Amino acid sequence: MNLRPDIVLILNDDMGYSDLGCYGGEVHTPVLDRLAARGLRFSQFYNTARCSPSRASLLTGLHPHQTGIGILTYDSGPEGYAGNLNHRCVTIAQALKAGGYRTYMSGKWHVSSNLREPTDSWPLQRGFDAFYGTIIGAGSFYDPNTLTRGNTNVEHEARQEGFFYTDAISDQAAAYIREHHAQHPDKPFFEYVAYTAPHWPLHAQDEDIARYSGRFDAGWDQLREERLDRLVQSGLLKDFWKLSGRDPSQPPWTEAEQKGWLLRCMEVYAAQIDRMDQGIGRIVQALEETGRLDNTLIIFLADNGACAEDIPEGVSLEELVDKLMIARANTRQGEPVHIGNNPTVMPGPENTYQSYGPAWANLSNTPFRLYKHWIHEGGISTPLIMHWPRGIQDQGAIRHTPGYLPDIMATLLDVTGLPYPDRWEGQAIAPLEGHSLKPAMARDQPERPPMFWEHEGNCAVRIGRWKLVRKYPGPWELYDMEADRTELNDLAAQQPERVRDMAAQYDAWAQRCGVLPRDKIVALMRSQGVTRAFWEDE
C-alpha cells in the first residue's frame, strides 16, 4: 500500500484575494468552498505578483530570478533575464519523479521563451510524464495559441465543437487520474493543474454569465465593504484593519458611466472563476471514484493579485497576434475579433478581447492596495486552500502562518519524505529557499524566516510583523502587518533604523539571488528603443 500522498497542485491566473466564496466573495465556488471547509485556509500566503515569476518560483522552490525568469519569457534582453527555466533549478515534478512519483500537467506553462519548438525548458523536459496545455501565458479561451500535447502542437483540437480551454484543462486533469494513472495504481502521482482563468480576455459561457445577472449591481464601493465584513466575520482578517481607499483613478460607483458594460465585465470575470470551480469538481470526482481522495493533498492558490490592466482600443494587432501570440485576429468561423475595452461591445464571446479594469480589480483585492505587478498586499496576497483528509485533522480551520511560493516545494518534499537535490545531471542546484508549511497543518506557527520579493523594481522584505515595501521608483514604506495589514499607516519616517536594517537585508538578498537593478534595465531598454507592451508602461 502506498503511504505517500498523491498531490494535486492547482494554480489559477490573475484572481484577487477575496473573489472566492470562502474568502468573502460573491463568486459561486461550492467545490473550493467545500475543500476549504474540510481542510485549511491560509490568511497570509503570498505569490510573486506576476504570471511567469510565480510559476517559476512555485515549481522550483527558489526565487524567480534564480531560475532565469526575471520578468516574463519574451526575448527582451535583461527585461526578461533569460526568460527560460535554467539548469540551476529542479522542478517539483523532477524531484518527485526521482522519488517514484508519476507526474502529470494540464494547463498553462509560461516559463519558456520558445513557444513553438520543444526545448529543455518545456514540461516533458522538466520532469512531467505527460503534458497538455499552452506554452504561452495568455490567449483566447476558445482558440488558444500554442496548445500542446506532450511536445506536439495540437491547436487543431480547439476546432472541435464545444471546445473551451478551462474545460479542456479540467477534463484532461481528471483523465490523467482515471485513465493514465490506472496503469500505475501502486505509484503515487503529482498533478499540476494550471488554469488561465480568470486572466483576460473576458471569455465565458452564456449560462455561466447569466448566473451573475444582478449580483454586482450594488457597485464596487458597497461590495468592497460587504466583502471586508465577511472576511472579518470568517476570521480571515482582523476587525481593526481598515478598508483601503478606492483606486484614485476610478469614480465612485454612483458616478460611473457605462454601468451596463461595467457590470457585464464583472459578470464575465466571475463566470470564468465559476467555470474553473466546476472543473475542479470533476477532478475531485475523479479522485473519489478512484478511491484516492483521502490520501491526496490538494493545494489551491493564485499566481498574483487581481489585474488592473486596461486593454486599450487600437492596440497593435501585430504585437498581440504575431509577436506576443496572445490573441487571434479572427474567430474560428473567420469573424474579426474586436480587441479593446470598447463599452459598445459586451465581453464574453469569442469575437471579443477585453479586461475588467482597475475598479473591479480593486474589488477583487479587497481590502488591500494595488494589483498584479506590485508588491503591496493587493499584488501578492492569494487564497491558499489545503485539503488532505488523511493528513489534516483540524478541518475547517484558518491558519495565519505567513508563507510564500518557495514554501510549496519545501512542503511537498516534507510531506513525501523526499530529498531536495544539490546536483542534477551534473549541474549544481541552488539551495532550496522555501520553508515547509507541514507543521502549520497541525497548528499556527509563530515564526518563520524572512520573506523577500522583487518584480520590475517593486520590492519588499517581511520580517516577523514588519514589512518594508517599495513601489518603484518611490521610497521605502514600512508597515506593521499585525496592526495595519492594509498598509495605510507608513511608519518609515518614525523608524529609520528599522528601515535601514531591513533595506540592508533586502539588498543582500537581491545581490545573492541575481536581481538586476530596475534603473539599469529601464535605461538599457530606452537606449535600445524597446517597445513595451500595453500592460508594462512605467
Image (spheres, rainbow, N blue to C red):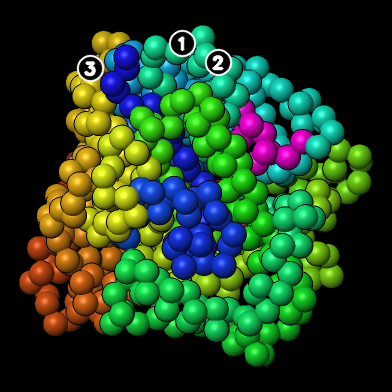
Residue 421: which quarter of the image?
top left
Q: Of the residues under marks 3 and 2, which one precedes in the sequence? A: 2
Q: Does residue 350 lie above or below 312 as drawn? A: above
As rendered, which of 475 and 385 lies closer to the eye?
Answer: 385
472, above or below 510, in the image: below
Q: Residue at x 65, y 90 (%)?
A: 254
Query: In the figure, is residue 256 to the left or right of 452?
Result: right
Of labels 3 and 1, earlier in sequence is 1
Q: Which residue is mark 2?
A: 180
Name the residue that disc number 1 marks.
184
**Are dots 2 and 1 in contact, CB under 8 Å?**
yes
Identify the magenta region: 163-172
Q: Position of residue 346 (x, y in %)?
A: 81, 64
Question: Which amino acid lies under the numbered mark 1 shown in the image of this protein?
Answer: His
Residue at numbered disc 3: 423
Pick the residue in front: 65 or 207. 207
Q: Image quadrant of residue 312?
A: bottom right
Kind of residue indicated by mark 2: His
Instruction: Measure the C-alpha gap from mark 3 to mark 1.
Output: 28 Å
Is 124 or 339 nearer to us in this picture?
124
* Relative horizontal placement of residue 322, taking residue 398 as reference (left or right): right
Q: Residues within 10 Å of mark 1 (few under 14, many from 20)?
A: few
